[in-house]
Image (tube, rainbow, N blue to C red):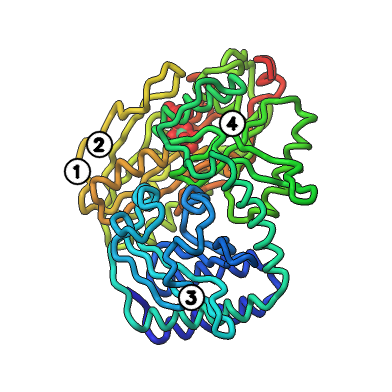
């Protein structure tokens, strides 16, 4: 594995700068973990510190590891790779088989193969460690090891900053309580399904995730937010965790005035646990999501008209021409396969292809819609021709939650194209759940219900030559 002399030097320079910066300590430690992992070409890294009782190793910085992995419980300093705390560098070639690993089943579930651990020594005494993780089995060079030992030295100096120990102590108290609770040693497994949900909307959301074959866990973790002395005084338990996206989702289908309270908890959660990814879906978002499929209370709404033009025909055409120019430039000298997902993309695809100054071929796919009947998504129309070894540009009219794109891109990648990029006319970022990089974007749009230029509401409005916003009053008729 590993970096070159130059990359070690640059990484150490950057890490030194971080250690000396005015950023919060969590941010510094997370950034150091990122830089260290990148430099030795690993997939993940975490920085662990021994609590003041020298019992447990607490994570103070991490990169590239899912929350599920990080919360497998505090590591017992005496049991988890104890040689590292003895001051030695430890290498585990296969974490799923090595008996020195405390939770091999979790390592396996997370796809972790090799682990390299180095001690953080302060005045000769182990204060913590840095662990590096890879998905593929690998060996680390001596240069990698000595680079990581230098990073550990910088961490040791950083430790002198007292605030870091305050962080560690806080996590330690929480961890101790978790250890006491029976649940602490048991990780919920992806197959664990609740027998009942707190609210019907949660059940509906779970069905929607099932449709896209997105794995989920229901209320798998409670985050302490406030303490009175040693006792946790306030907790926050997000409704869902999506391991594939390492994302928590909280649904607010309660009264609007309670959202302020939820927002406060969300803010606190982000301050205390900055490494956690969480999205709040409010009632409007959620009902609009279902209405898109003509489903849920809004699915019954009678829409009488478009309230406002968001982009006129002329604005759309100008933007489409600009996108086509960029794409033609980027793919100059190459042949391109344009793949569209029916039906919303028809107007955009037709206009975009006419302005491309490249040899292009065209293909379409269609996938089934969510209807709440327990069926999972399936491809109802597949590609006509093979895309193996071809440069593919997936063209979309809109990316909303990103679930469609996530599903389709996975399918396209499995055919091994030479390259695969995405071009979308509209990017509705406010409701994104799956963060997929978009290579070409026409317009970033607000969180409104939009129709026209291919986009529909219950099958209508696709033929409008402009993009318009449906009147909010009309949307509300369905019972928002
Ligand atoms: C639209 C659009 C995208 C998808 C994006 O299709 O064409 O494919 O929604 O939404 P997402 O990011 O939340 O998955 P829709 O399902 O409305 O079908 P249509 O193209 O036939 O209108």
Instruction: Say which residue label 1 marks.
Output: 386
Q: Which quadrant of the figure has residue 91?
A: bottom left
Q: Quadrant of the C terminus?
A: top right
Task: Using the rendered view, name the quadrant where residue 350 is placed.
Answer: top left
Give the alpha-carbon distance from disc 3 to disc 4, as whole Å: 55 Å
Q: Earlier in the sequence, mark 4 or mark 1?
A: 1
Report which quarter residue 60 is drawn in: bottom right
Q: What residue is shown at x 50% (from left), y 27% (from top)? A: 206
In the picture, measured across the screen, residue 341 lies left or right of residue 157, that is left
Judge the density around disc 2: few (<14), some (14-19), many (≥20) Cα neighbours within 10 Å.
some
Structural distance between the alpha carbons of marks 2 and 1: 7 Å
CA separation in Å, label 4 and label 2: 28 Å
Residue at the image position 38 percent from the left and 72 percent from the top = 90
Quadrant (top left, top right, bottom left, bottom right) of the N terminus: bottom left
Task: Identify the disc placed on residue 450.
Answer: 4
Task: Estimate the x, y position of residue 374 in percent, counting from the top left.
Answer: 41, 19
Of circles 2 and 3, the one toward us is: 3
């Amino acid at each position: 594995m590993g970096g070159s002399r130059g990359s070690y030097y640059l990484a150490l320079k950057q890490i030194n700068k971080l250690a000396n910066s005015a950023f919060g300590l969590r941010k510094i430690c997370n950034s150091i973990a990122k830089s260290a992992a990148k430099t030795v070409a690993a997939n993940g890294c975490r920085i662990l510190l021994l609590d003041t009782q020298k019992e447990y190793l607490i994570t103070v910085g991490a990169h590239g590891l899912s929350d599920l992995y990080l919360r497998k419980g505090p590591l017992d300093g005496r049991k988890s790779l104890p040689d590292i705390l003895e001051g030695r560098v430890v290498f585990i070639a296969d974490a799923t088989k090595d008996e020195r690993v405390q939770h091999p089943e979790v390592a396996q579930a997370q796809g972790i193969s090799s682990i390299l651990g180095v001690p953080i020594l302060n005045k000769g005494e182990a204060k913590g460690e840095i662990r590096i993780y890879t998905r593929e089995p690998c060996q680390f060079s001596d240069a990698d090891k000595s680079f990581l030992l230098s990073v550990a030295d910088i961490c040791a100096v950083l430790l002198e900053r007292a605030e870091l120990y305050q962080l560690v102590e806080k996590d330690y108290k929480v961890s101790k309580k978790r250890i006491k609770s029976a649940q602490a040693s048991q990780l919920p497994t992806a197959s664990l399904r609740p027998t009942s949900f707190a609210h019907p909307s949660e059940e509906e959301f779970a069905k929607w995730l099932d449709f896209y074959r997105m794995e989920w866990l229901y209320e798998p973790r409670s985050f302490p937010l406030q303490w009175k002395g040693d006792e946790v005084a306030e907790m926050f338990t997000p409704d869902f965790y999506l391991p594939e996206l390492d994302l928590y989702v909280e649904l607010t289908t309660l009264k609007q005035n309670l959202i302020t309270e939820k927002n406060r908890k969300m803010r606190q959660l982000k301050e205390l646990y900055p490494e956690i990814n969480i999205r709040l879906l409010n009632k409007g978002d959620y009902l609009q999501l279902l209405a898109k499929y003509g489903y849920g209370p809004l699915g019954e709404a009678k829409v009488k008209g478009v309230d406002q033009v968001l982009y006129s025909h002329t604005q759309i055409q100008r933007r489409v021409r600009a996108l086509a120019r960029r794409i033609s430039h980027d793919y100059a000298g190459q042949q391109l396969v344009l793949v569209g997902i029916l039906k919303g993309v028809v107007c955009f695809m037709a206009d975009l292809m006419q302005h491309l100054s490249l040899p292009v071929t065209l293909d379409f796919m269609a996938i089934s819609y969510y209807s709440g009947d327990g069926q999972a998504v399936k491809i109802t129309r597949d590609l006509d021709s093979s895309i193996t070894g071809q440069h593919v540009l997936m063209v979309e009219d809109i990316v909303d939650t990103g679930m469609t794109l996530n599903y389709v891109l996975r399918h396209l990648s499995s055919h091994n194209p030479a390259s695969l990029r995405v071009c979308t006319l509209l990017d509705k970022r406010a409701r994104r759940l799956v963060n997929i990089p978009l290579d070409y974007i026409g317009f970033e749009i607000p969180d409104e219900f939009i129709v026209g230029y291919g986009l529909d509401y219950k099958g209508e409005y696709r033929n409008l030559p402009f993009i318009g916003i449906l009147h909010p009053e009309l949307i509300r008729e369905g019972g928002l």
